[in-house]
Structure formats: structure tokens, C-alpha cells
Image: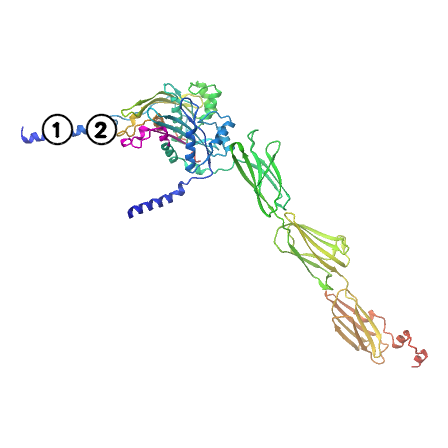
Amino acid sequence: MSFESRFGVQRLVRVYRFLFLVLFVLLGTGCETLLMRSDPLPVHRQLAPLPPGPICRVAVVPFLNDTDYPLADAIFHKVFAAQFQASGNYLVVQEGDILKIYQQLRLLPGETPTPEQLQIVGRRVNAQLLITGTVMEMRENRDRLGSTDPVIAAEIQIRDGNNGESLWTAYHRRQGIEYQKAMHFGTIHTITGLSRQMAMEIINLWQKKGLKQCDVSPRS
Amino acid sequence: MRILQKIRMLTLAVCCALLPAIAPAAGVPVAVFPLQELGEGRNEVNLPFTRVLAERLAESGNEITSLQTVIAFMANNRIRTVGRLETFHISRVREDLGAAFVLLGTVSQAKERPEPSMGLTLNLVRTYDARTVWSYVGSFSAGDERRVLGIGEPHSVAALQPLLLDEIVESWPWEIINEIQMGGSISVDSIVLQPTQVRPGEEVQARVLLRNVWPAGRAPRVFFKADDQLYAATVSDDGRTYEATWVAGEKNGRSPVTLVLEWPLYNRSETALLGAYVVDGTPPLFEIDLRGTRLHEGRQVFRGELVIIPRLLVRKPLDHWRLAFFSEAGNMEGALEGKGNLPERFIWQGRGTHGPVDDGKYQVVLEAWDKAGNSAKATGEVVLDRSSPDVDLALTQSEEGVVVDLEHKGKVPLAHWRMEMWTKEGKLLTKAEGSELPVKIEVDLPAGDQNQDIRGVILVEDVMGTRVRRKVEDLLPKVKPKAEVKEEKPTGISESWVDEF
């Protein structure tokens, strides 16, 4: 092997070493999400078409809790309802009105309403759509730095406000660390924050799939 | 350094320019309800953070209903849940607390372990249509606030609260809030405020019919406020009509009347301006000028028309007036009444209620009342004299002829007189004129004309302009001859001597 060829191999080795080091640093700092992962979308199913025209009056009824996490249904419900309100000019029925009807129907929050009871709720509050949901998983893991890494899985349904019939469903499962961008940035560390992000993703998907916003601005 | 100063000044100028656009609107009350906390149960309340949130919103320019008032409202309406309200209660918040918005919220998480974290959802609900106009979901954790070497990282939920509050204030919907024109919740159906002009010490009455009806126990205390005094209102049986009477103050001026509704339970009150009344203790000030008269012996005398010109010394709207004429005996001979302001002039032609009045002295009385009922009168005295100038003429024989005695017998002074006398044949005997009577004029009769008829004319014009022409022969009998005159006045001369003469 000549001196020149030996020198060329050494240089190539150095270049490879440098590239390997860069890759190692990227993986070590958590940028593996950039390189390997893609954001999972909610699993969306359409069982029946939505009522035609823009949707204005929507009732987000209490969700169900299929987890061990205390009040997981209430947390996700509160966040989802607020996020739904903020996502468009919807006239979201006051939670107080819905729970009043629940009280009259002898339904406790967290209990599963029958289709007939959902129909009663929908008609009483004059909602075009009912949104129901079940939180299937909610927990707080610890990441490498000792921070909270929340995990939530939920299934949300859009139902016909007139008869309670299920029209669309969306299943979504996310973890806080999935949103990490670089270093520790982007990671969601709170149940509330992850609920908000997931609610936003579900609602965005629904709107892409054809859920029309109400054209009555709150400023009107 | 200069560049830095310029940058600072530029920043300040930009901030000043933007300030009006982001300035909060005062007077749009927001009722912050106790925040729900999803901790051990669904109906836990987080009052400390509610207070902190309310204070921070108040500092940023919002008018926040006090938490104490909100809690009193909840107790009074038996609201036992937090984090939500029924539409019914939201509208009642507007009625009872006068709030334009209700802020409802839930602390979705507030944990110190495994690391400090806090989550919050807020809903701002407009009370007039119970619509949620703004929603907020926010959360912070120690993991979100990792710093280099851990310096300044939050180590407790309390340390996370300012971060949440900053974010809330930053996204606070000023545009929606500023658009609200918060009117009072008092809905007035009708108002009676009378009188609108009142004399000091007189009674004022106010009555309002409200559309608002409050159930027993929630009804506010109702007052009428005038001159910084509160007058308690009495309520009708149907609970809608409120009434009060009070005595007007002594001070002249305008007094606004305000309806005041007080809810002592909520430590709040609401007002509605009803109107105003004017306290006026000053009578109208005017005088009358009498025209068409002549001054005679210190009295104003008129014959045909008396022109009465009222003159307001201080302009003031009047309610009504009366012009009356009183005889010397004090009897009212006639009167004229009218509404509103005084006419420019009155003309009296000497007629009373029962037709023309007799000549004589009359008192003209003009009385006027202003809107408050203050009255004043102006008087004047006149003498009505319809008589024509009258002269008395007497002729007496003198040595050379005849002496004419002219005497004025009328009441109105003369302005001018003229007398001409001539014989039957037309020979001018005398011609005299003047402005004052009585007067004696000696007229020489030509010889041989002693028994002739004297003819003549007397023209008299009084100061009222009335002219009278009288014939001398009509005034007196024929001139008696000297002999006859002497016969009437015994002089001691025998008749026979006369005959002989």
C-alpha cells in the first residue's frame, strides 16, 4: 500500500468517525424523534354522515373513565370541551345545563348513559351534535431526567344530537415525549397539556374530514 | 450609548402608540366564580387560586365582582357545584350582580409530585346570551421550565401560578370584552315624575313601573335619589310599581332624580337616571306700561282704548296669566285669562263682563304664574272718561259791549280752544284762542247793534284729541239788552227815567 493510498484511507476513517459522532450526539439528545418517528394521527372512523351544513350547537357530555387515574374522564372532558370551543365558533352547551339534565335522569358523571338518555340530553339542550368520550388510558411515567411523561389514550365519538346515534369516532393515543423536538424542548410534561394537544389533533382531523365550523362569531 | 437611547425612545413611542388599542374597557364587570379543582373529588374548590386570578385580572384592567359577592350569590341561589353554571344562573348573574361576563374554570391538575405541575381550563361566558366566548387551556410543570444548571426553575405549584397567570392575561379576550356595552339591568317600563317645576318646599312625586320582577327574598331595596338624598320607595302589590314623595329643597336649580336599586346581600347597587325637576322659588318679574292715556291731575286718563303692554324684566316661561280690571269700589269688572306666555299687548276698550263699564277710576291688574306656580302681579291705575270737552259760555253786558265768560266744564284738560263771534250780518266781533280756560273776553258791540243776535262758534279740543264744535247761539240765550240787565239788578233808577231815556 502506497503512502498516498494509506493517507486516503485514514482520511476516510476520520470522516466516518465524525459522521458517527454526529449521529450519536443526535440520538443521545433525543432527536431520534426527528429521525425515526412521525406524528401518529387519531384513528378515525365514519359510521354515518354528519348533519348537513355548518354545525353550531354542540353538547360535550361527560366522558367515561376506563382507567385507574382519578378523574381522568373529568380532566379530559374539561380540556376537550374548552379546546373544542376555542377551535371554532361553536355554541357549546353549558356544562351546567347538561349536568342538570343528568341529575334529572339520575345519571352520575362517569356513568354510561343509554342511547335513550343521550337522545333526551340532545333534544333538551337542542344540540345538533353530541360529543361523548371514553378515556382508556391515562398515566404519568417518568423520563430519564425525572420529569413526568404523560400517556393518554381516548376514544371520542360524535353523535347525532337528535337520536344519540354514533356518527364518527376517533381513537387517539399519545405520549408526552413523542412531541420532543431537540434537547428536552417540545416534550409535554402534563396531563392537561397532553390532553389539550390530543384534543386539538382530533378536532383538526375532524375539521379536515368535513366537520364544518359555525359561522356565528362570538363577537356578533 | 446614543443608539441605545434612540432605541429606548423608539420603543417608548411604539408602546404609547399601541396603548389605546390595548387599553382595557372599564365598567364591564366580570364575575369570577370559584374554581373547581379536580383533586380528590369532582366538586373541590380552589379558593386561593381563584382570589389570585381575580386580583391579577383586576390589576390588568378588568372590573371584577368581588369573590365575597359571588359566594353570596351562590349561597342565595343554592349553587352547590363549582366549575360550571346553568344558563338560568348565568342570566341571573347578570340580573343580580350586573356582571357582563362569568369566568368559570377548573384546576385540572395541581400536584407537587412527581414534579410540580398545574393545569387550568377557563371559560368566559357572556351573561346576556350565556355563550362561552373565550376558552383557555393552560398547563405548566417544572419539566417545562428546565433551565441551565437549574437556576430559577420553579420548585412548587405556587411558583408555577405566575406563569399561568401571565399566559391568561396575555391571551385575555379584550376585543370581545371591549365590545360589550354593559347597560344596566334595570328595565324601566314607565316613569311619572311630577311636577317638573316646583317651588321650594313643595312635594315631588316619582313613580316607576319596572319590567323586572324579583321573587321574594331577592328583591332589591329601591330608592329615589334627589339632591343627594335617598327616599325609600313603596312597592305596589304586584311588585312592579315603586313610588315615593318628598319635599323639594330650598335651593333653586335642577335636581336630577335617580332610581337606586340596592342588593345589600351582594353589596352592589344599580342606578337609572329617571329625569329631573327644577326647583324655582323666584316669581316672574314683570311690569306693565299703559299707553293711550293722558296724564291729568296725576292720573292717567283714557277714553277709547287703553293699551297695556306687559314687559318681562327677566325672561322666564310662564304657565298662565290673568288680566283683570277693578273698579274704585274694588269690584272686578272684567277679566281675561290665558295659558303660556304673556301676549305682546292687551287692548282694553272699556268693556267689562256685562258690557261697557262706567266712566271712572279703574285698577288694571296683570297677574302671571310661572311653571313652578310662583306668581307675581303688576298693577296700574287709569281713569276712563268718555265725556267730550264741554264749555260753558256766559255773556254779560258791559259798558262797551259784552263780556264773554268761557269756562271748561269737562274732566279732560283742554289742549286748545278757539272762539269766533260775529253779528247777524256777519261782522266779526271777536276772535280769540288759547289753551287754558276759563277766560273772560270783552267784546265791543257796535252802536245800534245792542239788540242784535250774536252768532259765533267755539272749537274745543281736549288733550285726548277730542274736538267739539259748538255754536255760541246754542250755548246761551239771546243777549239781553243793558236795560233789561239793569232791570234785573235794581239800581235805584226809576223805570220812568229809563223810558224817557
Tag of residue A26: 2
Q: Disc 2 marks which amino acid?
A: Leu
Residue at figure coordinates x 64%, y 44% from the top left: B202
Q: Secondary structure at mark 2?
A: helix
**Is the C-beta separation of discs 1 and 2 under 8 Å?**
no
Dot 2 falls on which chain? A
Magenta range is B134-161
Q: Is residue B446 magenta?
A: no
Q: Is residue B135 magenta?
A: yes
Image quarter of the C terminus of chain B = bottom right
Where is residue B270? Give x, y as percent. Answer: 53, 37
Q: Is residue B357 above or below residue A46?
A: below
Nearest the eye: A202 or B135: B135
Q: Disc 1 marks which amino acid?
A: Val
Where is residue B484? Give x, y as percent. Answer: 89, 75
Q: Secondary structure at mark 1?
A: helix
Where is residue B165? Give x, y as percent. Answer: 38, 33
Tag of residue A13: 1
Q: Around disc 2, counting alpha carbons within 10 Å, would you say few (fewer than 14), some (14 to 19), or many (20 or more)?
A: some
Q: Is residue B194 left or right of residue A100?
A: right
Residue at figure coordinates x 45%, y 39% from the top left: B26
Q: Is residue B182 above or below residue B385?
A: above
